[in-house]
Image (cartoon, rainbow, N blue to C red):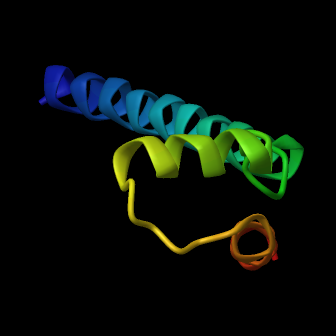
Amino acid sequence: MTQLHERNGDLGLEVQDLQEELRKERADREADKKSAPAGKDFPDVADLLNQLKAKRKKSKTDLADLEAILEILEG
């Protein structure tokens, strides 16, 4: 019976350790989310237009269209 109580106590301590580790991990993730930049870093608009024109030669998209798209994505 004593061994059972000791084992129970050991498991209780292990649970507490795991709960503390989980709390720290969650706090770290929240801190990472807050420190991450809000928007993505997109390439220069002109570079994107050139890439688009290379892939879709008949694309009617122009520089203003891409600027508007990037503003939407960043917004």
Location of residue 17 in the rendering, given as x and y in whole percent from the top left corner = 52, 29
What residue lies at 69% left-to-right and 38% top-to-bottom?
47
Front residue of this view, candidates 59 and 51: 59
Is 65 placed above or below 9 here? below
Q: Height in image: 54 above or below 73?
A: above
| Residue 25 percent coordinates (x, y) | 60, 36
Q: Residue at x 52, y 41 (%)?
A: 51
Quadrant (top left, top right, bottom left, bottom right) of the N terminus: top left
Residue located farthest toward the front when viewing the structure as drawn? 58
Would residue 41 be seen by someone viewing this image from the given angle?
no
Above or below, 21 against 69 in this view is above
Horizontally, residue 45 falls left or right of residue 24, namely right
Q: Give the camera-side residue of 37 and 57.
A: 57
Q: Is residue 49 left or right of residue 63?
A: left
Task: Report x, y in % for residue 36.
Answer: 80, 43
Q: Is residue 59 something that shows in the picture?
A: yes
Q: In the rendering, at what x and y percent does residue 14 appear?
A: 40, 27
Q: Nearer the viewer, residue 29 or 38?
A: 38
The number of callouts visible is: 0
The quadrant of the image that shows the C terminus is bottom right
Which residue shows up at 45% across the image and 67% down it? 59
Give the quadrant of residue 3.
Answer: top left
